Every structure is written in C-alpha cells, then in structure tokens.
Amino acid sequence: MRSRRDVLKSAVLGGGAGVVAATALGSLGPEAAFAAQKSFATQQVEPGAPDPNFAEGRIRSIKDNTLLVLGSNMVFHTIRVVDGTSLWKLGPVPFDQAKPGDGLYARGVLMPDGILAAEAVWLNIVNIKGHIRNITSQTIHLDHNGQDVLCHVVAGKSVAVHSESPPTADLSMLKVSQHVQIMGAWRPDTNEVDIATVFSPH
Amino acid sequence: MARSTPTDPPIDLLAPVQGEVSWFCCGTAWGPCSSTGKGACGTCNSGSLQHAWPNTSDACWAITRPDSCGVSLTRRTCGFRHRITALCTGASVVTAIADCGPQTDLFCGERSCCGATCASNRLIDLTPAAYTQIASLSSGLRPVEISTA
C-alpha cells in the first residue's frame, strides 16, 4: 500500500497527474494526517542533526502552489503544496490563507531537485509558556520570558484545556499569575497572538 | 517553598517512563521565538532532532524541579539520546539533548490523554522538527513514553 508520503512525492514528480492522485487522499487535518501514516517509520536522520525533510522560516513569495521561504538561518526553502497537503493557521485552512510575511514550519519529503513536497504546513504557529499578567474577556497578557505577548481570544476558535478535561470555549477558569502554555497563531511583525488552545495544569 | 530531594532511584533509570511532551523553538527563529537562544547546550535549533531534558545539570534541576511533582529523573547531559514514543499513535523519534527544560514544576499533576491513554507531568520538550516526527504541532501536548536510545 502506498503511504501518504509516497503520494506526495509522486505529486511533485508527476506534476498534474500526481496532484490528482494526492487529491484522492483528501486534504486531511494535521492530526488526521499524522495519525494516518507516522507509525513505525524508520528514522533516517541522525539524532541531533538538522532534518532535511523539515523547514522553517517566513514566506517571501508565493507562485502557483509553491512557497518561497527564507529560513531564519538565511537558507532558502522551496515548498510545494499539493491538494493532499494539510495547512494550519489557527485551524485547518485552504492554501489561499498563506500570505507573504507568514512564518511557518513545514514537514514533507525533500525531492532530489531541492523542493520540499509538503505533507503539512503550519502557518504562524507558536507554542509559548508564561505567566498570565492580566485577563480581559477578549485578551490574555502573557509574560513570556519577560516579554509581554498580547493573546487574543477568537470566537469559535479559542479553547482552554484544563489538564485532561475536554477542551472548553469557556476561558473564565484561567487566573492571573498562573502558568499556562498558549498555542496559537502569531500576527506577523507584532507581539500579538490569536489563541487556539490555552493549556492549564489545573 | 521547601523542596524535596530527588527520590532514589530515578524512575527512568531502569525502565521507560511515561509523561507529557510539548514543543519549543530555539536557535534562529521568527515571531515570539526570535528572542530564544541556542539553549543550554549552545546547539539547539528548531529544525534539528533535539530535545530539552529537565536534569542536565544542578543549575537546570534547580529550575525545572520535577521532584516537586514526585518525579525523579536521571542526570543526562548534552547530546544524550532518548527515544520518544507517542502513546497515541506508536510513532517514535530518537533525539539528542540540546537544552534544559521543560519547567516540570509549573505544570505539576497536569495530565494529557488521547482516548483512554494518558500520561502526567511534563518531562520532555521537543524541537518542532522532532515533534512533527510523532505528532502535529497543532496538537500542542501529547502523552509519550521516554526511553534511552
């Protein structure tokens, strides 16, 4: 049976026909994509070493289905998005939500020509820990390593997870001075984040 | 606050240990991560298969204090390899220590689950490159098993 990664690879090698093949798998949400095919793969990369099948950086330009990304280490990445690629930006989104200036992490398959065939792309995703400095009904001020990060509650998107309890849209249990982890989407070139999930230990 | 000394022997010494894993950025980066350095070992990069461990030194232990959650972990230093296996999917990755963390004591007793499978306390943090080998970044927190590689 062909893996999802095999299909993504052929989508790039085979051009249009491959893209159609990838479409047959559907555009899975990130969680489903990982649950579907990450099990028991043999690790090819030495522990501690850079992973060639992973990229990070900010989008410089977008042409057709290709993202030109400048890594924070000043290395360029060319990332090909196909119909089977999952994209996240505060939740699963279509490709047209990717914008120049967005930060990203991407995982896929590095092709011989240097293009990364993307399996998943996370746009502007951040996962920061800190103390809550202040709370209003619409915002959380987070002290993250001494840096003030303004986190916005987004209706229909933001949830809190209190230990093993199910996610809840009610963020009223969060308290000033408590320590939390906030996973969300950075607003480029600001100190502001839209909240996806607040993880609270209690 | 009074701190207890680590229990003996550490729980991860003779057998794999279960706990929570999250992800963190390090090295050159964008957004709120841009102020993050290369970690306690001076080698940490978001794009490398690396992790943070709560007991890399006395100074590290003094910050992370997993013992205050009733967990003792073995001292392991930069470059030591662990295998991290997601309890949700069975996917695993082998990574090397590149930083001190997570701050286990700030999340004492926290428990994360997938279905009926759960694990408590934050014992390890992975770089984005490592975390995406076993789960989606958007999951944020997952129960795992940690063993020596």
Image (cartoon, grey):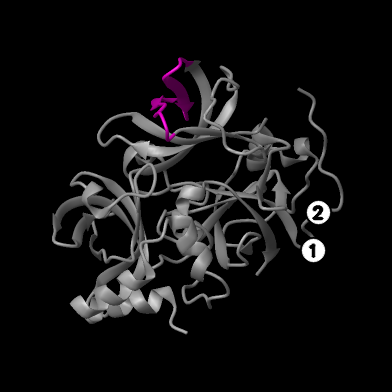
Is residue A87 left or right of B138 when viewed as pictured? left
| Local SS, label 1 | loop
Q: CA distance from mark 1 to mark 2?
A: 7 Å
Residue B102 rendering spot, x and y as whole percentages: 60, 43
Chain of the residue where label 1 is placed in the rendered structure = B
**Residue A39 occupies quadrant:** bottom right
Q: Write down the region rendered in magenta.
A: A135-157
Mark 2, secondary structure of its residue: loop
The amino acid beneath tag 1 is: Ala
Q: Return the residue at label 2.
A: B11
User: In the drawing, does residue A155 fall left or right of residue B69?
Assistant: left
**Residue B73 image point, x, y percent:** 74, 50
Residue at the image position 81 percent from the left and 52 percent from the top: B10
Say which chain tag 2 marks.
B
Write the residue at 24% across / 60% down. Answer: A75
Residue occupied by mark 1? B15
